[in-house]
Image (tube, grey):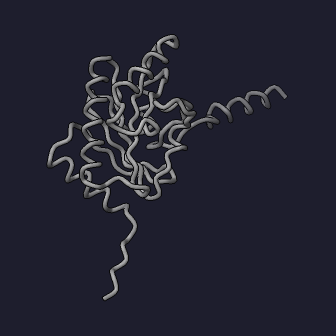
């Protein structure tokens, strides 16, 4: 009988209950910058593809720079006509901060991003383990803006890094096109 508890414990140690599959996002409850409840990534709602713009940093100045660079990415996607109900871009800053500054950070982000992107498609993800969050998704914490293409069922497809440029925008847009529904040919 002494072995039964040991076997039971070994089973649960070997098979963690809350383990995520590699290359997936952890689920995080937050509020969007317009103060609505949001569950990341479950509440992303594009019909064909979600473009997840991630600012993942361990230093405040770098995180601010990444956030601004990702607003430029959003503007570029919008200028290309890439955004619709089929393809939606979501802006998330991943942060580890004390609980008492979360409201200040969320408010500052809302003020900074107002009129630059939809506040209902942006949020701060407050987590304790930034590196663990990134590792679970297969994303490097390297101080660079991160773009992740995610299907409506939550599958991470492709990851891009860096600032927007003509070349980087063309590369991301070519990948986005692979996930768009086929357009019917007009009848003649």
* Whether residue 42 is visible: yes
Instruction: Tell which residue pokes out farthest to the right in this image.
Output: 1
The quadrant of the rendering that contains the C terminus is: bottom left
Instruction: Tell which residue pokes out farthest to the front in this image.
Output: 115
- Residue drawn at 43 percent across, 35 percent down: 119
Q: Is residue 41 left or right of residue 186?
A: right
Q: Position of residue 117 (x, y in %)?
A: 35, 38
- Residue drawn at 32 percent across, 45 percent down: 159
Q: Is residue 66 above or below residue 166?
A: above
The quadrant of the rendering that contains the N terminus is: top right
- Residue drawn at 48 percent across, 17 percent down: 102
Q: Position of residue 91 (x, y in %)?
A: 38, 37
- Residue drawn at 48 percent across, 39 percent down: 25
Q: Is residue 5 left or right of residue 133?
A: right
Q: Is residue 44 left or right of residue 64?
A: right
Q: Position of residue 44 (x, y in %)?
A: 49, 45
Instruction: Tell which residue pokes out farthest to the bottom in this image.
Output: 188
Q: Position of residue 64 (x, y in %)?
A: 30, 23
Q: Quadrant of residue 105?
A: top left
Decide which of 123, 55 is in the foreground and name it: 123
Q: Is residue 53 above or below residue 50?
A: above
Decide which of 7, 166 is in the foreground and name it: 166
């Amino acid at each position: 009988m002494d072995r039964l508890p040991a076997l039971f414990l070994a089973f649960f140690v070997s098979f963690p209950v809350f383990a995520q599959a590699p290359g997936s996002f952890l689920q995080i409850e937050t509020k969007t910058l317009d103060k609505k409840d949001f569950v990341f990534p479950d509440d992303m709602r594009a019909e064909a593809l979600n473009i997840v713009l991630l600012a993942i940093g361990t230093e405040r100045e770098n995180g601010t720079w990444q956030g601004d660079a990702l607003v430029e990415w959003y503007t570029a996607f919008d200028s290309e006509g890439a955004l619709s109900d089929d393809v939606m871009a979501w802006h998330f800053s991943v942060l580890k901060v004390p609980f008492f500054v979360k409201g200040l950070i969320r408010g500052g982000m809302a003020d900074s991003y107002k009129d630059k992107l939809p506040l209902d498609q942006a949020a701060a993800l407050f987590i304790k383990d930034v590196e663990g969050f990134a590792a679970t998704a297969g994303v490097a914490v390297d101080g660079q803006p991160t773009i992740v293409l995610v299907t409506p069922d939550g599958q991470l497809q492709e990851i891009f890094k860096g600032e927007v440029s003509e070349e980087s925008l063309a590369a991301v847009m070519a990948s986005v096109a692979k996930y768009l529904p086929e357009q019917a040919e007009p009848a003649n």
